Image: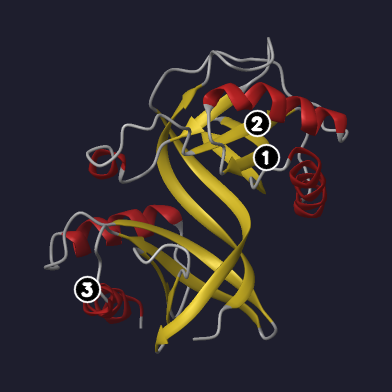
Amino acid sequence: MKTQELIGKIIIEENISPIDRNKIKNTFVVHIPNPLASYYSRFTEVNRPNSIVLITKNPVSFERVLRATKKINAAEGMKIHGAKCEINTGSRKYSGIRIKGIERYTDIEKIQQDYINEGFELRKNERMSNDTNALIKVNKFFDLNQVDESIFQSPNNKNRFYIEIPKDVDWNKFRDLTFDIKNNVSVTNYDIAKGIFYKNDGITDMLRVIKPNITLEMVKEIQQKYFDRLS
């Protein structure tokens, strides 16, 4: 099965928390938890960050983050994944670098310094409560295998699927729609986010679905529910 690479954006709603230790003093770093943490924690005791965001003083470009991350990985022998990120918490809006693939919390300070060495200016620390509700937008690359009509699967995570949908909906409508569908579908305990792919013919709207041991049949059932309401 041929893997294709696309550029796009994911929008998720999660409860984020500030990181207070293992960072450069007076810098602002937040942790985005694994949406299925309660499931996976039963199978591993490894305490590693799922996804962190280095909040920057100014907005950053996707290209600049990618170039810097490539240099850092080559110099440090790491395999972190950097992406452009925006976080909205109520009236507050932050920009930063979303990083995945960090092995230990104690690596964060060194990684921060690496990005500083690449010219990024980090934002000073701000007060934030644990489990602060946030809307998070991440620009990233997607590696995908097409497994059915308008359905793609991550080759690196068999529990992660992407569904192309016919049109965009704003976040509030998407949240209400998702709540209704989750109460009227046989599939349970899945996490869903909305996003877009940038393709040659323009923007394609999509959904990302994650569930432990999810099957293509489950994804098709979820897909049909959204198609019925958005077509």
Q: Amino acid at mark 2?
A: Leu
| Relative side of 163 to 94, left or right | left
Q: Position of residue 44 (x, y in %)?
A: 30, 38
Q: Is residue 89 above or below residue 86?
A: above
Picture residue at 57% right of the left edge, 66% below the top: 142
Q: Residues within 10 Å of mark 3 (few under 14, many from 20)?
A: some
**Taking the image as drawn, is residue 63 in sight?**
yes
The C terminus appears in which quarter of the rendering? bottom left
State the CA–CA distance, disc 1 to disc 2.
5 Å
Disc 1 to disc 2: CB gap under 8 Å: yes
Q: Secondary structure at mark 3?
A: helix
- Residue at the spot of label 2: 54
Residue 89 shows which numbered tag?
none
Disc 3 to disc 1: CB gap under 8 Å: no
Picture residue at 68% right of the left edge, 17% below the top: 27
Q: Is residue 4 above or below residue 7?
A: below
Q: Is residue 134 above or below residue 218?
A: above
State the CA–CA distance, disc 2 to disc 3.
35 Å
- Residue at the spot of label 3: 218
Q: Amino acid at mark 1?
A: Ile
Compare marks 3 and 1 and give the one earlier in the sequence: 1
Give the farthest residue toward the front. Answer: 77
